[in-house]
Structure formats: structure tokens, C-alpha cells
Image: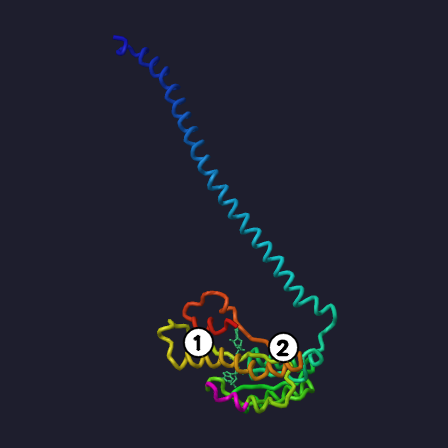
Amino acid sequence: MHGTVPWFKDFQTRRTRPVITMAAVDRFYLLYREISRSCNFYIEALAIVGAWYTVRKCISLVFDTYSMLRLHLIPKLGGEIDLVKQYGKWAVVTGSTNGIGKAYAEELAKRHVNVILISRNKEKLEAVSRSISETYKVETDFIVADFSKGREPYTAIKKALKDREIGILVNNVGMFYPYPDYFTNVSEDVLWDMININIASANMMTHIVLPGMVEKKKGAIVNVSSASCCQPTPMLTIYGASKNM
Ligand SMILES: NC(=O)c1ccc[n+]([C@@H]2O[C@H](COP(=O)([O-])OP(=O)(O)OC[C@H]3O[C@@H](n4cnc5c(N)ncnc54)[C@H](OP(=O)(O)O)[C@@H]3O)[C@@H](O)[C@H]2O)c1
């Protein structure tokens, strides 16, 4: 009977609404508490990972800063090193008629070191050799050699360097891919060239020059590498591997 009376219906609605609302809030709060409790675990785990990463980064930053200061600042505080006194009269630079090798040859000559250039092209070697000796007033010499020819060039190089006091060797010569490609598509010729020019040349030149340095108890060998050696280089695989000096 009461259910049909409008005021009673209204009364019933008002009485039940707050109860339902309270129940919903309670459940939501419980749910929230449960979620945040399980989240806390993940947040703490992530905080540990973050702290570990930050500590590692800080340590490597300290080491990198120290290396930078040791390499670039501390030597300059004591004035420029006399390369001739420290290492010897002559430097050999492979692949020295262009690019980085030529820049090395010029920088060494600027610091009064006599330079022996090694590349394939005689005309270019003559021109660079003359230009360096005229500009920096040092002695220069050159050897025509093609490092892609396996063992062939080293007998002549060894003979030409025999009576020279080689203090610095810059293993600079290097070849890159004609274009990036899958390893399986790279021709055998390119593979052998890359092995001979990038890997064998540095090993063989060091083998020729190092005994003299050991005997004199002084010398420096610079291997020109590449950032490709330190990270995966898809489509440039053998170049990256060959620069891992
Ligand atoms: N350029 C870059 O961005 C870069 C980056 C990272 C590392 N590198 C490394 O730095 C070094 C020099 O690179 P670069 O770009 O300055 O080289 P580059 O400009 O191409 O010069 C190469 C030099 O090597 C000589 N050469 C080439 N093939 C030779 C061979 N088979 N036998 C003898 N000599 C040869 C060339 O002279 P001839 O043609 O007259 O023989 C030239 O003097 C390489 O080891 C390279 O891997 C370069």
C-alpha cells in the first residue's frame, strides 16, 4: 500500500541514496589503497634502477672528465711536449696524401718531426711531401705502396725504413664501404681489401717499426680507429670490426 504513495517513494529514495554512495566511496578507497600499495613496490624497484643508473653515469662522468684533463689540459700546463726529444726524429704516416693522414703529417711537421708519407699515388706523394717540407722546414720522404696487395708492399717499406730513427707511427690508412650493404652482398674483393688495408697494414707496419722503438725505449704508435668500432653498425659490419683496434 505504502509503495504506491508518491511521498513515500521520495522518502525511500532519499534514505537509500547516501548508503549506496558511501559504499561506492568505500570500495573506491579500498581499490585505490590496494593499487597504490602494489604500485609502491614497482616505484621502489624503479627508484633503485634509477639510482644505479645515476651512480654509473656519475662515475663515468668523473672518469671521462679526468681523462679529458689528463689528455688535453695537464700536458699543456707543462708546455708543449718536444716530440723529437720524446719519441724520435722521424714519423711515418700511412695514407697521408689526403684527409686525416695528411693533417697528421702536417701537424707532426709543424712540431719539427721529419715525416715519411706512404700512399699509392706518386704524384700526390711528391706534391704533399714538397709542400710539407717547404712550409714547415722539415725533411720529408715518401714510399709508394698499395696496402690492398696483401704481403707485397712490406718488403719495400721495411727496406726504406731500415736506417731511419722512427719515433712515431700513425696507422691511418683505411677504406670504407663503397656503400652500406648486407654482409652476404659484399664481394670477396671488398672483404680482402678491407682486411688488408684496415687490419693487416696496422699490424704489419707496427711489426716493422716496433722493434726499433723497443730498442731505443721510446716511441709512439697511433692507430686511427672509428666510432663504428664501438657500436653495432648494421650494413657496415666488416668496417666496424676492422676498426676495433
Ligand atoms: N673520414 C671520416 O669521417 C673518418 C671517420 C672515422 C675514422 N676514419 C678513419 O680515418 C682514416 C683516414 O680516413 P680519411 O677519410 O681521412 O681517408 P681519405 O681522405 O680517404 O684518405 C685516404 C688516404 O689513404 C690513401 N690510401 C687509400 N687507399 C690506400 C691503399 N690501398 N694503399 C695505400 N694508401 C691508400 C689515400 O691516398 P692514395 O689514394 O693516393 O693512395 C689517402 O691518402 C681511415 O682509417 C678511416 O677509417 C675516418
Looking at the image, which residue is at 66% across and 78% down?
A: 218
Looking at the image, which residue is at 60% across and 55% down?
A: 59
- Element type where label 2 sits in the image: strand
Tell me how the rendering is colored: rainbow
Quadrant of the rendered image containing residue 129: bottom right
Residue 205 rendering spot, x and y as whole percentages: 55, 82
Q: Callout 2: 10 Å neighbours few (<14), some, many (20+)?
A: some
Q: Nearer the viewer, residue 26 or 18?
A: 26
**Mark 1, residue position:** 177
Residue 229 rendering spot, x and y as whole percentages: 49, 69
Looking at the image, which residue is at 65% across and 80% down?
A: 108
**Mark 2, residue position:** 220
Residue 62 rendering spot, x and y as whole percentages: 63, 57
Residues in magenta, as a range: 150-156
Residue 186 rendering spot, x and y as whole percentages: 38, 76
User: Does the magenta segment cover residue 151?
Assistant: yes
Compare marks 1 and 2 and give the one earlier in the sequence: 1
The extreme right residue here reads: 78
Q: Nearer the viewer, residue 126 or 165?
A: 165
Amino acid type of the residue tagged 2 in the rendering: Ala
Q: Callout 1: 10 Å neighbours few (<14), some, many (20+)?
A: some
- Indicate left or right for 84 with 40 as reference: right
Looking at the image, which residue is at 70% across and 78% down?
A: 86
Amino acid type of the residue tagged 1 in the rendering: Tyr
Mark 2 Cβ inside 8 Å of ligand 1: no
User: Does the magenta segment cover residue 30?
Assistant: no
- Element type where label 1 sits in the image: loop
